Image: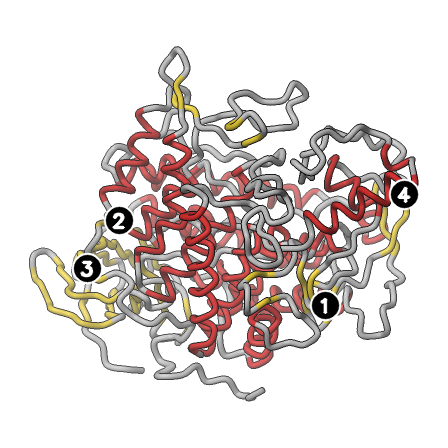
């Protein structure tokens, strides 16, 4: 263990309620996760359920993160078991077989597809092989590095998966190094997808799932992608005319599938993951080169990120120069809501790897662009457009509610940008949103329903650090505890056996919730769910047990944030044991501490780490000076030295 500057707590105090709530929440989820694993999966780790393959990986996506915050070590073992079981279950190594595992969607029996090749997403089910879904499916894999970066097999996989996107894997020619594009919206361990069948074209142009579905109801072209302006109006029923169907399939493959799109920016997360394991410069170079290309496209396109790029890297190359219309792009029913996930992932990766906050403009430019096109209702409520079409920015929604109309700008991306920069410019942007919001109480802790991509709690978190919501930690932890408790109770009363679970085919309920623990302990928004890496102002390690996360009985609260500092409270709830905490600057040691101040006693510091000794029943508050993005990031733990010690070298 390296020598570190240290401080010792001396105040013997009753523990604050937030610290008790943190430990109670961790303990509840430590009990619930094994219960879920036993009840909803075979001992091998295979879930009694089926849907898209990424959803399999997502069942235990945050268990390693809970461990890295201070949860039980068995969380990592279970997460690995379920990840490996999913990879085995969908693997094609027996010769493109289909597994003999029946499952049901409604009354329809189906079988699992062989959607894995070389341990990663294949083209057997191309709908999984695009970056909204691959990003979701990768979340569990990324946090293996956060929990234990010494697992040789995962280091090998990280390099193997990155090779599929930087041009090193001949089986996966996704990357065009000349034109600097990923060659299709669907890309995989088997390369790009350029040849969609009829049913896929119907689904991507008109929404829903048409295959073997007599109840399918098509929507007007543009639900997911468009052929505009080559085809401006596409009447229903074209699929029943063989000649017309052949024409539309050809146009779709040429216009939609042959080129790059914004969603592929999430591949930067996969390549950054390899860098955090290895420190190899080729990974950093690829990420920054790819982000640079997209930032140049924004400049070429008048400040708006184009949603489609042709095979030679030109904007709207197969659309007569039209910059919108791509898959899940500006004209789709999702508009910017899905598009921005990948932009934010790439922004954070580029800043992390370069230390250059100029890369924050990738995301910031799009937020400012939407605000430049904003308008207000009669009551003064601020609205931004979320879609664009032939008439320009959409100022109303479609009559059937499928296509998004204008709305308040969600705070998800703005708070991520602000957390990176801590700049007045990004703070002022959020304040503008708050002042223009006539509907929401920003102090209220709310959850919008999807615990994975839930950004509703970011409003109340922002208010806390802005000095306007002092009881937020307790309120948020109580609300999250209630969510976890409800999930725990559902597990307790579910008495179905494996055969009934398979027949019912209901999503196994993950009882692990890490949103509020991340926010309170690490002083950061939660990861961008669709492929983002961990965000943290500070992170903790248990010195005595040489493992990540807070020691037993210890609570942590980041209670202030600034451009050059962070305030941290640490509390030892144990009445008998001393605990020793290592505090790290940043999720991956990317920041540098410049000093630590305890009650006016200042110690100069020039390190990623410092140590805190917490005798029984003590607490301490530390003001730490911080130089942001000053260090090379790595998954390495404080005691790993210059390189992560992996037992096997591949």
Q: Does residue 275 sit above or below 650 in this rendering? A: above
Q: Does residue 208 sit above or below 255 in this rendering? A: above
Residue at 65% of width from left, 42% of height from top? 490
* Mark 2, secondary structure of its residue: loop
- Dot 1, crowdedness within 10 Å: few (<14), some or many (≥20)? many
Mark 2 or mark 3, which is nearer to you? 2
Distance from the alpha carbon under mark 2 to that under mark 3: 15 Å
Inspect this view and state whether residue 212 appears. yes
* Mark 3, secondary structure of its residue: strand
* Mark 4, secondary structure of its residue: strand
Indicate the position of residue 601 as horizontal and vertical percent values.
7, 61
Residue at 21% of width from left, 60% of height from top? 626
- Comes first in the chain, label 4 or label 1: 4
Mark 3 or mark 4, which is nearer to you? 4
Which residue bears the numbered disc 4?
108
From the image, which quarter does the C terminus lie in? Answer: bottom right
Distance from the alpha carbon under mark 3 to that under mark 1: 48 Å
Tell me if 147 is positioned left or right of 460 in this view: right
- Comes first in the chain, label 3 or label 1: 1
Which residue bears the numbered disc 3?
624
Which residue bears the numbered disc 2?
422
- Dot 3, crowdedness within 10 Å: few (<14), some or many (≥20)? many
From the image, which quarter does the N terminus lie in? Answer: bottom left
Residue at 30% of width from left, 25% of height from top? 435
Tell me if 387 is positioned left or right of 467 in this view: right
Number of numbered discs present?
4
Q: Does residue 535 sit above or below 444 in this rendering? A: below
């Amino acid at each position: 263990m390296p020598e570190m500057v240290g401080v010792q707590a001396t105040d013997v105090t009753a523990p604050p309620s937030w610290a008790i709530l943190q430990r109670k929440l961790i303990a509840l989820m430590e009990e619930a996760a094994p219960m879920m694993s036993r009840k909803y999966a075979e001992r091998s780790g295979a879930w009694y359920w089926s849907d898209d393959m990424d959803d399999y990986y997502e069942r235990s996506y945050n268990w390693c993160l809970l461990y890295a915050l201070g949860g039980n070590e068995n969380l990592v073992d279970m997460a690995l078991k379920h990840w490996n079981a999913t990879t085995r279950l969908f693997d094609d190594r027996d010769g493109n077989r289909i597994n003999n595992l029946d499952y049901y969607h409604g009354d329809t029996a189906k079988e699992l597809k062989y959607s894995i090749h070389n341990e990663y997403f294949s083209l057997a089910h191309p709908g999984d092989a695009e970056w909204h879904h691959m990003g979701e499916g990768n979340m569990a894999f990324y946090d293996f590095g956060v929990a234990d970066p010494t697992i040789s097999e995962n280091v090998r996989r990280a390099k193997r998966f990155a090779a599929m996107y930087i041009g090193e894997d001949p089986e996966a020619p996704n990357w065009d190094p000349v034109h600097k594009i990923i060659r299709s919206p669907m890309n995989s361990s088997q390369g790009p997808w350029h040849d969609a069948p009829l049913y896929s074209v119907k689904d991507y142009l008109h929404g829903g799932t048409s295959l073997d579905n007599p109840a399918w109801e098509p929507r007007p072209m543009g639900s997911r992608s468009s052929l505009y302006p080559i085809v401006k109006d596409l009447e229903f029923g074209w699929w029943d005319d063989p000649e017309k169907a052949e024409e539309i399939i050809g146009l779709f493959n040429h216009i939609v599938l042959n080129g790059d799109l914004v969603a592929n920016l999430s591949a930067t997360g996969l390549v950054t993951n390899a860098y955090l394991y290895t420190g190899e410069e080729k990974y950093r170079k690829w990420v920054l080169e790819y982000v640079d290309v997209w930032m140049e496209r924004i400049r070429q396109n008048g400040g708006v990120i184009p949603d489609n790029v042709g095979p030679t890297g030109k904007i709207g190359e197969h659309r007569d120069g039209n910059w919108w219309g791509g898959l899940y792009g500006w004209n789709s029913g999702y508009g910017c809501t899905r598009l921005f996930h990948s932009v934010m992932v790439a922004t954070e990766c580029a800043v992390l790897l370069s230390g250059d906050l100029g890369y924050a403009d990738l995301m910031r430019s799009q937020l400012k662009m939407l605000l430049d096109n904003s308008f207000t209702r009669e009551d003064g409520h601020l609205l931004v457009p979320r879609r664009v079409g032939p008439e320009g920015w959409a100022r109303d929604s479609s009559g059937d509610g499928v296509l998004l109309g204008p709305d308040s700008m969600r705070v998800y991306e703005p708070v991520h940008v602000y957390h990176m920069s801590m700049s007045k410019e990004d703070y002022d942007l959020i304040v503008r949103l708050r002042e223009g919001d006539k509907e929401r109480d920003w102090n209220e802790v709310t959850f919008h329903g999807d615990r994975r991509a839930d950004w509703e709690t970011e409003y109340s978190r922002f208010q806390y650090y802005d000095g306007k919501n002092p009881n937020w930690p307790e309120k948020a932890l109580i609300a999250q505890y209630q969510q976890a408790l409800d999930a725990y109770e559902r597990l307790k009363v579910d008495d179905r056996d494996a055969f009934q679970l398979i027949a019912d085919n209901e999503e196994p309920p993950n009882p692990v919730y890490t949103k509020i623990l991340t926010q309170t302990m690490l002083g950061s928004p939660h990861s961008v769910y669709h492929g983002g890496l961990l965000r943290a102002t500070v992170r903790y390690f248990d010195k005595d047990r040489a493992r990540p996360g807070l020691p037993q009985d210890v609570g942590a609260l980041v209670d202030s944030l600034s451009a050059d500092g962070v305030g941290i409270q640490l509390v030892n709830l144990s009445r008998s044991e001393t605990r020793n905490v290592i505090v790290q600057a940043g999720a991956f040691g990317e920041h540098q501490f410049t000093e630590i101040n305890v009650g006016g006693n200042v110690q100069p510091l020039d390190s990623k780490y410092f140590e805190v000794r917490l005798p029984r029943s003590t607490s301490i508050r530390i003001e730490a000076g911080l130089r942001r993005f000053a260090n090379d990031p790595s998954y390495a733990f404080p005691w790993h030295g210059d390189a992560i010690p992996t037992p096997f070298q591949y």
